[in-house]
Image (cartoon, helix red, strand yellow):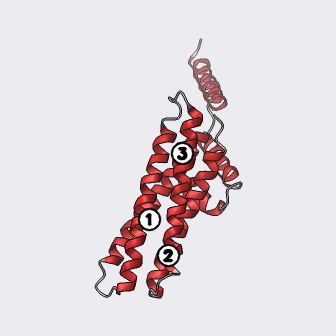
Amino acid sequence: MDQQSTFFSSIFLTFITISIFEFVTPSSSATTETYTNYIKTSCNYTTYPSVCTTSLLPYALAIKSTPLRLVKQSLSATLKSASTTRTIILKLVKAKNITKGDAAVLKDCIGDIQDSIGEIKDSLKAISSLKSSKDKKFVLSNAQTWTSAAITDEYSCTDGLSDEEISPVVMKKIMTSMVSIARLSSNALYFINHLNI
């Protein structure tokens, strides 16, 4: 075989190899689109779709198209938000210009948010053990109960705001943070309730 034939044969083989590789291996952009579409579609059924997509889309590659991973990440997003809110409330408590009324409300809210964090952690732990559990229905029921309890505690904080005279600034910060957590929790509970086991 002459040099020219060898050259063209090499080109042809390279072309075939690349073509086969592209055919067998889906492009990463197409895969990512599949995962993001899964999250968007799933979130459309929740009570707060926009909150759902905003909190979960950054984790599309980790969630993939797996319902259990969707639940875990949804609970993780709730936990992260609750931890951030606890930090915000603790900073408000330590503020020099805090009034007694504000301090009392914030103290109650810290208790509520601590309870909520504990319950979300328990729920996440239960969901994480679901695959290996012999009694999946019992474990799932526990996750539902703990997430529901977390929502109750989150709204206990906001309900307490109407019973006290507090400053508008403190009121706005607490309301914004707690409502955000409650919505994330509500979406997580929806996914737990619709998890097929």
Q: Which is more toward the observer, 55 or 29?
A: 55
Q: Earlier in the sequence, mark 2 or mark 3?
A: 3
Residue type at the position of mark 1: Asp
Residue pointed to by mark 2: 160
Mark seen at residue 143: 3
- Tell which tag, 2 or 3, sits nearer the viewer: 2
For badge 3, the amino acid type reads Ala
Disc 2/disc 1 C-alpha distance (Å): 10 Å
**Residue 87 percent location from the top left of the image:** 36, 67
Q: Nearer the viewer, residue 190 or 52?
A: 190
Residue pushed farthest front? 163
Whether residue 91 appears in this view of the structure is yes
Mark 1 lies on a secondary structure that is: helix
Q: Is residue 24 above or below residue 99?
A: above
Can you see residue 61?
A: no
Distance between mark 2 and mark 3 Cα atoms: 26 Å
Could you tell me which residue is drawn at 66 percent across and 60 percent down?
49
Q: Quadrant of residue 179?
A: bottom right
Q: Amino acid at mark 2?
A: Gly
Residue at image coords 58%, 22%: 10
Q: Relative to residue 95, is residue 80 depicted above or below? A: above
Relative to 59, residue 134 above or below: above
* Circle 2/circle 1 CB separation < 8 Å: yes
